[in-house]
Amino acid sequence: MDEEPVRTRLIAALGDIDADAWDTCAGADNPFVRHAFLAALEETRAVAPETGWLPQHLVVEDAGGALLAAMPCYLKSHSLGEYVFDQGWAEAYDAAGGRYYPKLQVAVPFTPVTGPRLLVRPDASRAELAAMLLEAGTALMTRRGASSLHLTFLPEGEAAYAADAGFLLRTDQQFHWHNRGYRSFDDFLADLASRKRKQIRRERRAVAEAGLCLDVIEGADIRESDWDAFFAFYTDTGARKWGRPYLNRDFFSLIGARMAHAIVLVLCFREARAIAGALHFRGGDTLYGRYWGCLEYHPALHFEACYYQAIDYAIAHGLQRIEAGAQGPHKIVRGYEPVRTWSVHRFADPRLHAAVADYLAHERTEVAAAMTALRRHLPYKARGRDTD
């Protein structure tokens, strides 16, 4: 008997897709590819045509309309909110007479976190459906007159599969903390060289001596007043980094209501007034540090709220890894290690495709060399542990 036919379809909004069917394809480990997170971005208009993110999600369905696979995709008029920087490519292509925008971006908007991008139902044929998604993305690139198709922060296996299908492979690095069976924060400190151990203790002591108290609030215990406080911190950081924050206040209420189980909020108080906060998401065996902000500067407070509280939480809850977002070689002295990240790229113009291919060959070599050099500065007693 012939197999039932499948079809590829474009969806213009996450709200048009059954949440349970999407999440079956996305899996439970990564909170950012879950329907609730992606839909909240659209419903609060953080992701919308007016912000330069036009949803163009691709799905594969069987003959009965059941969802087999999906790919979160956006038609973009700029390169903001991606954290895999291609503005130099855009400028060079425009200078040569091309038109770089619009482009297609397969990603979680504003979220530099590695996670699946080719979402396939566990009981379906992964290789076949992943190929269909990549082919559909390439066809959509042509149909929309886009210059390129980019899949960013995808797992190494998906990146390798796309590279075999003709996409260009790009690497970068982040800094992640790894739990090596620690029973307590002091157990973690004991694994560090003496000078680094003393530095961290000194930083934690400075926060306590400043009269600052930190409170870890989870899930349904987070009140709207807590979100009000945190949004003020987030807004201050966003205004300084990007000119304007990507997310609005409604977004935090929405994820607080729909994703309570995945949210860990650290708030810092001075004399009963919240002055700083760090927002983390929990998924699978990993804690994801996402946003931080403060209204008052205090030495070492950023390290305490974002890194040390996260390490304390991960150890207490048996989590194996902390991903603290983009950038940050300063994280190394606090126990975070360089880890490679992956993206893949395809260009409609073969000349641009060839030029970027040459550039990326050199860039991959530079990234590898930088990671090797950074590993020499790991603070652990036994150096050179390879977590790549």
Image: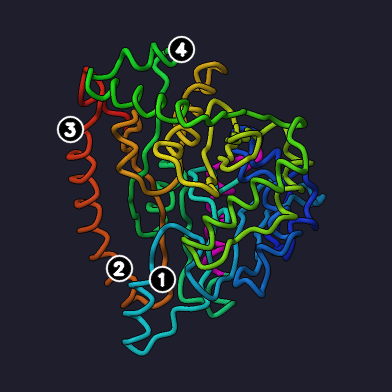
- N-terminal-most mark, 4 or 3: 4
Q: Give residue 261's quadrant in the image.
A: top right
Q: Position of residue 191 (x, y in %)?
A: 30, 15
Labels 4, 1: front one = 4
Identify the amino acid type marked 4: Ser
- N-terminal-most mark, 1 or 3: 1
Question: Residue visible at 43% across and 75% down?
Answer: 348
Labels 4, 2: front one = 4
Q: Which residue in the structure is indicated by mark 1?
A: 347
Q: CA distance from mark 1 to mark 2?
A: 9 Å
Which segment did they paint magenta? Answer: 120-139
Mark 4 crowdedness (10 Å alpha carbons): few <14, some 14-19, many ≥20: some
Identify the amino acid type marked 3: Arg
Q: As drawn, is 334 to the left or to the right of 9? A: left
Q: Which residue in the structure is indicated by mark 2?
A: 356
- CB under 8 Å between discs 2 and 3: no
Q: Position of residue 179 (x, y in %)?
A: 42, 20
Image mark for residue 184: 4
Q: Give residue 14's quadrant in the image.
A: bottom right
Question: Residue visible at 46% across and 12% down?
Answer: 184
Q: Which residue in the structure is indicated by mark 3?
A: 376
Identify the amino acid type marked 2: Val
- N-terminal-most mark, 4 or 2: 4
Q: Is residue 1 above or below residue 17?
A: above
Q: Identify the image quadrant of the C terminus.
A: top left
Residue 140 in sight in this render: yes
Q: CA distance from mark 4 to mark 3?
A: 25 Å
Mark 1 crowdedness (10 Å alpha carbons): few <14, some 14-19, many ≥20: many
Q: Position of residue 283 (x, y in %)?
A: 60, 32
Of the pair 145 and 334, the residue shown nearer to us: 334
- CB under 8 Å between discs 1 and 2: yes
